Image: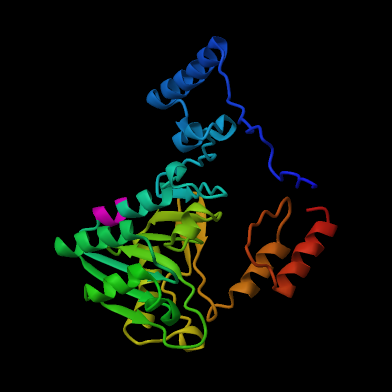
Amino acid sequence: MTKKRKTTSSKRSRKKQAKFTPGAILLLLLIVGILFLGSWFKWFQVDWEAVLEGDFEHAILKPPVVVEPVSGEWYQLYFTSPQYPDDERTRVYTLIDGLVAAINNAQRTIDIAIYEFDLDQIADALIAARNRGVQVRLVTDSDELDQLDTLIRLKKERFPIVPDERGAIMHNKFAVIDGAAVWTGSWNFTPNDTFRNNNNAILIQSPELAKNYTTEFEEMFVRHEFGPTSPANTPYPKIQLGDTLIETCFAPEDDCSDRLVELVQGAQHSITFMAFSFTDVAIGQAVSERGRAGV
């Protein structure tokens, strides 16, 4: 009679158990101690989940390169400090803090025209401003009004919000504070624009510049004039602040691209630009021509 071969071994397999020598334990305690001290004295930030998983290579969170605000007599200039992948523990709030401070200092009026708005910190500041008697008005893009939580929240709080109600985009990003200061730049009030994208904003103290932006705001908020229906009626097209000439240009009514071509064509030494999208052929040709001329 033939015996069937057993399919399993008669001997149990034994799992190898990790053995820690006193030296290894001492080294582990030393590493954890260094991480603890670094976190305690704020030399660096520690991802303790990675430590518990034994992933010491990624235990120290790399802080982003922080671009500090630049201030002058009549302006404050801000830049985002984005990082990818985004980590809430190392986020930089420079632009949020700057705008919130401006809102907190408002005494009479705040007018905001913004394409995307989804930051509760700014909404909280606007609610606090209204509660102390400041008039707050907003203009935004129709597509964003019922999609972004913060705009929905402000709408429920009965803030006066005027959407553009058209297929084109209301792409402005500015705020006028007390008719005396203007906040503007490339920055939408969103986590993505704040923590993941390169953006800028500038706060300029100038009643004349504020009048320019208030005029544009009134066209949209009061008369619902957007895009081609918006008149070219800027009160102070050119403003001198110290040694700096500031020109105000609103698209599409002020033919901003034509003016930019003129400035590029007049460049003698250098042209520096940053743009997310660069598709204007005339501007591109002007830049190329000046480059061939040695600028």
- Secondary structure predominantly adopted by residues drawn in magenta: helix
Residue at image position (63%, 57%) is 274
| Residue 163, x across and y down, in percent | 38, 82
Q: Nearer the viewer, residue 221 or 276?
A: 276
| Residue 69, x across and y down, in percent | 45, 43
Q: Residue furthest top?
A: 22
Mark count:
0
Q: Which residues are magenta?
A: 101-105
Q: Nearer the viewer, residue 213 or 167?
A: 167
Q: Residue furthest right?
A: 292
In the image, residue 246 above or below residue 1: below
| Residue 239, x across and y down, in percent | 46, 61
Instruction: Tell whether position 83 is magenta.
Output: no
Q: Nearer the viewer, residue 13 or 155?
A: 13
Where residue 264 sits, quadrant-wise, is bottom right
Residue at image position (56%, 30%) is 56
| Residue 162, x across and y down, in percent | 33, 81
